[in-house]
Amino acid sequence: MKSTKNSGIKKSGILKFEELNWKQIQELDYQKTIFYLTISPLEEHGPHLPVGTDIFTARDVIFETAKILNKKKPELTYVILPPIPIGSCKFNTDFPGSISVSSKIVRDVVYSFGSSLAHHGFQFMVISTFHMAIAHLRGIYSAMNKLKNKYNMKVCEPWGPFFFSDEIKNREPKLGFDSSREIHAGFRETSLMKYQYPYLVDESYKNLQSIYRDLESPRIVGKKFKQLGLKEGYVGSPSKADADYGRWFFNEIVNVYVNATIALYENGKILKLPKNKNIIMKALFWE
Ligand SMILES: [Zn+2]
């Protein structure tokens, strides 16, 4: 990290927001600073994965993204905000460990972070979340719209648009099964944790039976996991987990964030969720 001659004030590179004082923040180049905000809930992830699974991935991806970007675009400053462990996950609060806040709160928190920065002239923020529940995304996207309208702030959330496309399926190594049905604490996430935090994966994952549900079906709206027969709190095949896939998947996610940051900075490009997700979001009540 570079620093100025006498004051020791860091002006570029990768910075942790909470370690800076306001003078250092004031000295950042407003046009060349990208803020990263990680926001994902603490939430049950089956009997085998930690409740911080989403936040671990969302946070670690950002540090890796910043490292790569710092080499690719060293003229920019990457400021990483501390992760916010909140999100909307009402559907599995019938398990201890799931802490759900309303989508309104998600919206207000994201908006408050963004507007507090935009108020001082900062222009770019990338939101990192690995929690793809529509109510949670609704809070994030609503805050993004508000930030754009009020401050012309450029804010994007890269993972949702990628996750809901066919890109993962098209790019992933050959598996012999459909990984898009691995919705919660299944093959994909167990593989990620086996790669990132193997010591946090309970060995019982090897004996968990495959269980599938279409959580987007209108019939299940408003139902909680146990009502859907998801007694262990996962959807998918954790037993197939593989650390090599986890490494591939992690790097793929990083790649998505690297590209989205460059597109945001260079062209003000804000990725959108697919239309059908927007329709569902609009139909939801704020709660
Ligand atoms: Zn998850």
Image: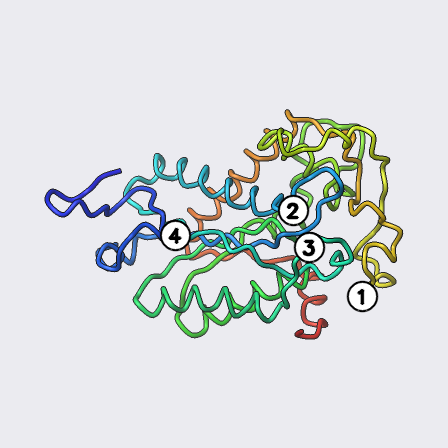
In the rendered image, which residue does mark 2 sit on? 51
Q: Amino acid at mark 3?
A: Ser
In the rendered image, which residue does mark 4 sit on? 265
Q: Position of residue 78 (x, y in %)?
A: 36, 47
Q: Earlier in the sequence, mark 3 or mark 2?
A: 2
Examine the image and state in which quarter residue 243 appears. Answer: top right
**10 Å crowding of disc 3: few (<14), some (14-19), many (20+):** many
**Disc 1, SS:** loop
Q: Earlier in the sequence, mark 4 or mark 2?
A: 2
Instruction: Single out the mark in the foreground, 3 or 4.
Output: 3
Q: Residue at x 63, y 34 (%)?
A: 200
**Disc 2, SS:** loop
Q: Amino acid at mark 2?
A: Val
Q: Position of residue 180 (x, y in %)?
A: 75, 42
Q: Residue at x 77, y 29 (%)?
A: 240
Q: Please say if the residues under marks 3 and 2 sit with CB atoms less than 8 Å apart.
A: yes
Toward the front, the furthest residue is 96
